Image (cartoon, rainbow, N blue to C red):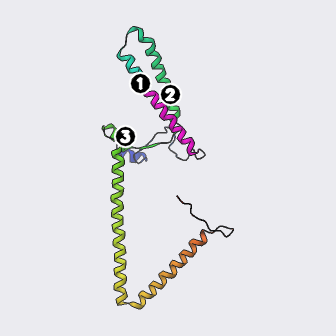
Amino acid sequence: MDSAQNAAAGNNGVVNAQGNNNNSTNNEGATSDDAKQNLSDVTNSIEKTLGLLHQLYLTVSSFNVASQLPLLQRINSLVTELDNMMKLSGKCNIQVPMEILNLIDDGKNPDDFTKDVLNSCIAKNQITKGKTDAFKSLRKHMLEELDEAFPSEVDAYRDIRASSAAEMKRLAQAQSALPNGDVKVKGEL
């Protein structure tokens, strides 16, 4: 799927590992421990499948007539484990960006995607911080210039800003008050 197909499909370049359901809220009752256990089960199944594939490779690479029965048993074990993996993966809701899959297809490290996304976020953060600082500097400079030209209007503006800030603080405190008069306190992280 190319990016145009992804946009048309409405999935924004994200592949949902849960085949039949794209709704992330379908397991609202499930706890995070259940989600971790489901992911752990899928991971264990993947590791078991890789082990079975390795055993199958060894059996096929040294195949003779006497190893036909072990070969069939290993194929059956592989099919059973793949079926088990599909059932377990249905309980997991993992979304993988298409860019990661494309990187893997190209033989590149998927960590490069994470690094690129973080670098992009840092760059955008620096740009936004620069814009914010520029506006603060502009505001300060304009207030200084206005204070020289219109001192009484700037004083009135500052009074309005101070009363508005006090009113906002009072409203914020009122909203954080509980019905019994106690104040909500943010928990420390």
Q: Disc 2 to disc 1, how far (Cα)?
A: 14 Å
Instruction: Pick out the residue farthest to the right.
Output: 180
Closer to the eye: label 1 or 3: 1
Q: For mark 3, what is the residue?
A: 101
Q: Is residue 36 found inside the magenta-colored segment of the image?
A: yes
How far apart are the alpha carbons under marks 1 and 3?
A: 22 Å
| Place of residue 78 in the rendered image (x, y in percent of width and height, measured from the top left) | 46, 23
Quadrant that contains the N terminus: top left
Residue shown at 48% from the left, 85% from the top: 159
Q: Is residue 123 above or below residue 177?
A: above
- Is the residue marked by circle 2 packed among few (<14), some (14-19), or many (20+) residues within 10 Å? few
Residue at 38% of width from left, 21% of height from top? Answer: 57
Residue corresponding to mark 1: 53
Q: Which residue is mark 2?
A: 83
Residue type at numbered disc 1 = Leu
Q: Residue at x 48, y 19 (%)?
A: 76
On the image, the x and y values in percent for residue 40 come to: 51, 37
Q: Residue furthest front?
A: 188
Magenta residue span: 30-51
Provide the major secondary structure of the magenta segment. Answer: helix
Crowd band around label 3 with a 10 angstrom C-alpha radius: few (<14), some (14–19), many (20+)? some
Mark 2–mark 3 distance (CA, rounded to whole Å): 23 Å
Judged left or right of residue 120, residue 161 is: right
In this rendering, position of residue 107 left or right of residue 15 = left
Choose the circle earlier in sequence order: 2 or 1. Answer: 1
Q: Amino acid at mark 3?
A: Leu
Given the image, on which type of amino acid does mark 2 rest? Asp
